[in-house]
Image (cartoon, rainbow, N blue to C red):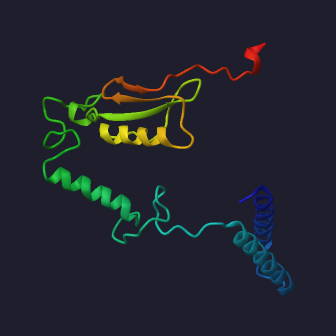
Amino acid sequence: MNHAQVTALGRALRLLGEHGEALTADTPDARLHEVRGDLRRALDLLEESVGATAPATRCPEHPNGPVDDSAPDRCLLCETRRRAARRSELNGSSPYGRPGGASAAFPAASRYGVREDRPQPQQRWLPEQWTGREWQLCGTPRRDRREAELFLAAQRRGPHAAMAYRLVHEFTDYEVVRVWGTPVRVDIEPMGNM
């Protein structure tokens, strides 16, 4: 809704409010026809202002998501999440990795979480290219080293090959595994910044 629509709709609704305050038992029919016309204009303005369809659910996160009539907010996605949480509580697996939630030895969950909450380190191979000023990621990080090397080989053979490529191994830290070509720093200013 843009500013002009907001202004026009606000004006029409304030006019209807004034009509409502002025209504009495002996209001003439001519005045009621005027109220009906103003009400129709306000409804037309409202119809023009509304851009999206009416929300199917009462969920603020998924207003137009799939509907589950048995859910309190009618949102199938949120209800599925709630059911999975209830199932995990009943089956003895909790979000903290201990049956029944925090045990008596740990009355409150740790601010930093427990080991099972933290993601395990993941090994990835990052293909990078030299842009003339810095190393830049040039493809999707791969889980397989051979696949990453094949990707870089294809890049080197391509029509717009970079000056140099490298393969970086990411585990808990970064390690440059292999470099193809020689990266040379290129000054972007003509005539060397003179």
Seen from the viewer's position, the closer of residues 116 and 86 is 116
Q: In which image quadrant can residue 21 be found? A: bottom right
Residue at the farthest right position: 30
Q: In which image quadrant can residue 113 be found? A: top left
At a point 46% along the width and 66% down the height, the residue shown is 57
At a point 17% along the width and 30% down the height, the residue shown is 106
At a point 80% along the width and 78% down the height, the residue shown is 35
At a point 55% along the width and 24% down the height, the residue shown is 134
Quarter of the figure that contains the C terminus: top right
Position of residue 98 measured from the top left corner of the image (x, y, whole percent): 15, 39
> Total number of numbered labels?
0
Above or below — where is 101 with respect to 107? below
In the drawing, does residue 162 fall left or right of residue 96? right
Position of residue 175 measured from the top left corner of the image (x, y, whole percent): 35, 23
In the drawing, does residue 157 fall left or right of residue 5? left
Q: Judge whether residue 140 can be spotted in this image.
A: no
Position of residue 125 measured from the top left corner of the image (x, y, whole percent): 35, 34
Position of residue 56 measured from the top left corner of the image (x, y, whole percent): 49, 69
Residue at the farthest top position: 194
Above or below — where is 51 with respect to 26? above
Seen from the viewer's position, the closer of residues 72 and 28 is 72
Seen from the viewer's position, the closer of residues 99 and 25 is 99
Above or below — where is 101 with respect to 79? above
Q: In which image quadrant can residue 104 be found? A: top left
Above or below — where is 130 with respect to 56? above
In the drawing, does residue 16 fall left or right of residue 160? right
Q: Judge whether residue 122 can be spotted in this image.
A: yes
Quarter of the figure that contains the N terminus: bottom right
